[in-house]
Amino acid sequence: MDSGTDGFLPPPECPVFEPTWAEFRDPLDYIAKIRPIAEKSGICKIRPPPDWQPPFAVEVDNFRFTPRIQRLNELEAETRVKLNYLDQIAKFWEFQGSSLKIPNVERRILDLYSLSKIVVEEGGYEAICKDRRWARVAQRLKYPPGKNIGSLLRSHYERIIYPYEMFQSGANLVVRVLSWFGA
């Protein structure tokens, strides 16, 4: 590429430093000394004296660590949001003296996060109940039509998610439950 025709200027070469034993007696002092030169290019390479060993060297024969296994789908932001939601709702139920058991619907683990999100998008729990739109919620969760899955989702929502969301909003759940039954 001709740097004169398109305005491209190549970055400066990376400076390479090869200190003597005397210069490298204190590596941090040496780095401070060369810093103004290295900052001009943004990077530098230091080749220490040939027999130099860092004082903090790890004993390779005795060094062990356990790698963290992270599945690729866990890197997605929405997956992290779902995992965080499940963690919060599980902690809520733990504080209530119960453990969270995620139900299966149509041989699939119920996605509590998506159920909660769709209920909000559809206008909230009360609106869906009033307009009898639980079948639409089931459809949006990709469940097959005609198996009364909507009422099953409503039951799971009322039992698992609704108390958590009322707690999050600061509402008094006992008063709301009593008002449903006309008390």
Image (cartoon, helix red, strand yellow):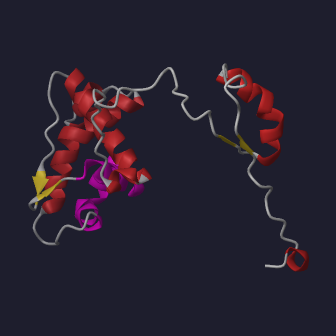
Where's residue 113, x and y in %? 31, 48
Where's residue 28, x and y in %? 68, 23
At 83% from the left and 44% from the top, the residue drawn is 40
Tell me if 130 is positioned left or right of 47 in this view.
left
- Above or below — where is 4 with respect to 46? below
Where's residue 13, x and y in %? 77, 55
Q: Is residue 144 magenta?
A: no
Quadrant of the rendering where the C terminus is positioned: top left
Magenta segment = 111-140
- Above or below — where is 56 with respect to 40? above
The residue closer to the viewer here, 37 or 92, is 37
Quadrant of the rendering where the N terminus is positioned: bottom right
The residue closer to the viewer here, 113 or 47, is 47
Where's residue 81, x and y in %? 39, 46
- Above or below — where is 67 with respect to 149? above
Quick check: can you spot residue 120?
A: no
- Above or below — where is 72 with respect to 158? below
Residue 139 appears in which quarter of the rendering? Answer: bottom left
At 40% from the left and 26% from the top, the residue drawn is 58
At 17% from the left and 72% from the top, the residue drawn is 145
Q: Is residue 128 magenta?
A: yes
